[in-house]
Image (spheres, helix red, strand yellow):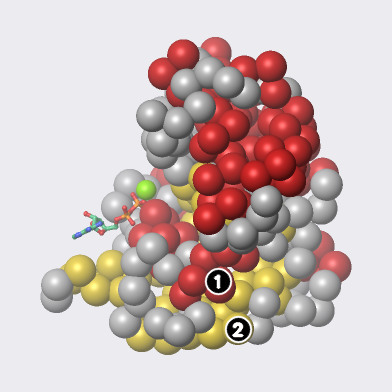
Amino acid sequence: MKAGFPNASRSSKSVISLEKVEKLYGTFKVLQGVSLNVGSGEKVVICGPSGSGKSTLIRCINGLEDHHGGRISVNGCELTEESRDQIRRAVGMVFQQFNLFPHLTVIENCTLSPIWTLKLPRREAEAKALQYLERVRIADQAHKYPSQLSGGQQQRVAIARSLCMEPQVLLFDEPTSALDPEMVNEVLQTMQELASEGRTMVCVTHEMGFARSVADRIVFMDGGTIAEEATPQEFFSNPKSSRLKDFIGQLR
Ligand code: ADP
Ligand code: MG
């Protein structure tokens, strides 16, 4: 656990541990030795310019992309070819484009993995799905198809779907970037509620109001490295690098 982040001391054990993680696309090193620990219950916001490696980093954490150097561990288990499926079950992921199955209803989207991967009986999977759809206030739409819902509603379904796998940690990759402005808040509010339940969350987002109120720590990525990390207070009031000063200056 890094010193200097008081909120991180809630747990002495890291749920996510990255040690000098490297990732290449061809000869291009997109992650250049990234080290990061996320403790149980901790909320980490990742921001940074487009192309700085944010999506690649969180895709590596749940094994959607292979890393080529360093170590990634989730709950003390190193991510390898053999552990990948187990780790992917422990790590929920919410994407910018929702990624719901268009030919399945809301509830079918939520029960598919629990039934096929966790081998839950259908009835149990449906009860759990309804419980989480209720949590994101969309249970009344359970039998609709994604195309019949607004973007904000679809993203809340995607969050519920992820919760149905009872993940140890939730990763979000710009979950509000594809939404019309009037739908951003309903999704941020849902995320805020999850945060207040003590869930461990890593969110790539440029919603700095959310970062300010929810993050224990904000990480600024630049050129495939973590250029700076700090508590929200420190991050905004005392940015150290000129890149971060520029970045903050460009925010709305
Ligand atoms: P961010 O999410 O911070 O915008 P990404 O992680 O998506 O950044 O991308 C980091 C860099 O890697 C960018 O330069 C991007 O063009 C490149 N990149 C991303 N995905 C691929 C890919 N599948 N193949 C080749 N290059 C990629
Ligand atoms: Mg991205």
Disc 2 residue crowd, few under 14, some 14–19, many 20+, Cα 10 Å: some
Quick one: SS at disc 2? strand
Q: Which residue is mark 1?
A: 87
Q: CA distance from mark 1 to mark 2?
A: 8 Å
Q: Name the amino acid, label 2.
A: Cys
Q: Quadrant of the N terminus?
A: bottom right
Question: Which of the pair 34/240 is nearer the observer?
Answer: 34
Q: Residues within 10 Å of mark 1 (few under 14, many from 20)?
A: many
Q: Position of residue 11 (x, y in %)?
A: 82, 72
* Mark 1, secondary structure of its residue: helix
Q: Residue at x 81, y 79 (%)?
A: 12
Picture coordinates of residue 90, whole percent (x, y) = 62, 65
Q: Which residue is mark 2?
A: 77
Residue 77 at x, y percent in the picture: 60, 83
Q: Residue at x 85, y 68 (%)?
A: 10
Contact, CB < 8 Å: mark 1 with mark 2? yes
Q: Nearer the viewer, residue 70 or 64?
A: 64
